[in-house]
Amino acid sequence: MIKTVELPTVFRSDVRLDLIRRAVTAFQANRRQPYGPSPMAGMHHSVRWSGKGKGVSRVPRLRGTMTGAQAPGTVGGRRAHPPRPDKVWVKKVNEQERRLARNAAIAAVKDPRMVASRGHRFPEDITLPVVIEDGIETLTPDSGATREGLKILNHLGLLPDVERAKDGRHIRAGRGKMRGRRYRQPRSVLVVVKEAGNVRRLLGNLPGVEVVNPAALNAEVLAPGGDPGRLTVFSEGALEILRSWPT
């Protein structure tokens, strides 16, 4: 520890798990892509229905045969209740609720118990959140930027968490592995700086590490999956911007 910094008042917000989960669920739902079959799927048959009272089941049948077709449960027939392409996946969240959820997620990053419950690895004697000087934003290594970023995280004592994220990358269960989502990557350190350009060169390629500016903070970035307490590093300039936020 080099010096202490007074945190903005937003870090004293109530940690509302219900609001965080609601906001994160909305973020995830709004990325869903509507899907469903063609309206005419399973309907391309020349069938007839002979009416009732004939002593046979009331199933549309291919003309000239007794083979059932087109109805649900028949070979090549339509589905009874398929997914609807016009289903509305979007979930709306009130602006004030969304802001309170963001503030609640920010307040959670200073609680070591919440951060540890997410599985993050950090020194026991460290004070959360970690605050660094603005000089990191002006670092412009000619080569080996990621190597310099590893040295910075190692100096802060946060390198074990990056290694945890690297070792935790695994093939996804289910059909998603065939649809461009083959791997699941655990989330590691979140770095919040005033200007993210150069810092993203240093840390953006490390597994699980994200670099954002204060304007990009939301409940999902601060609490992936709706679980608050992400291991977070703030620059002094980013904290100054947070001081102007309403609580």
Image (spheres, grey):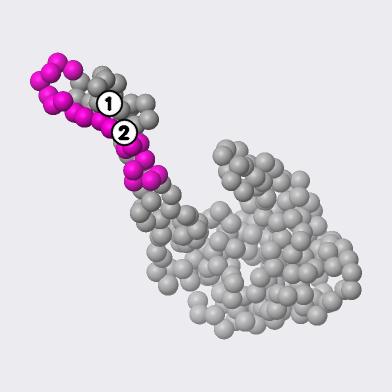
Look at mark 2 in the image and give the residue it sits on: 45
Q: Amino acid at mark 2?
A: His
The answer to whether residue 247 is above or below residue 172 is: below
Q: Amino acid at mark 1?
A: Leu
Look at mark 1 in the image and give the residue it sits on: 62
- The secondary structure making up most of the magenta span is loop
Nearest the eye: 173 or 235: 173
Which segment did they paint magenta? 37-56
The single residue placed furthest to the left in the displayed view is 53
Indicate the secondary structure of the residue bearing disc 1: strand
Residue located 59% across and 72% down the image: 216
The answer to whether residue 116 is above or below residue 83 is: below
> Does 46 appear in magenta?
yes
Q: Position of residue 104 (x, y in %)?
A: 53, 66
Indicate the secondary structure of the residue bearing disc 2: loop
Residue 125 shows up from this direction: no
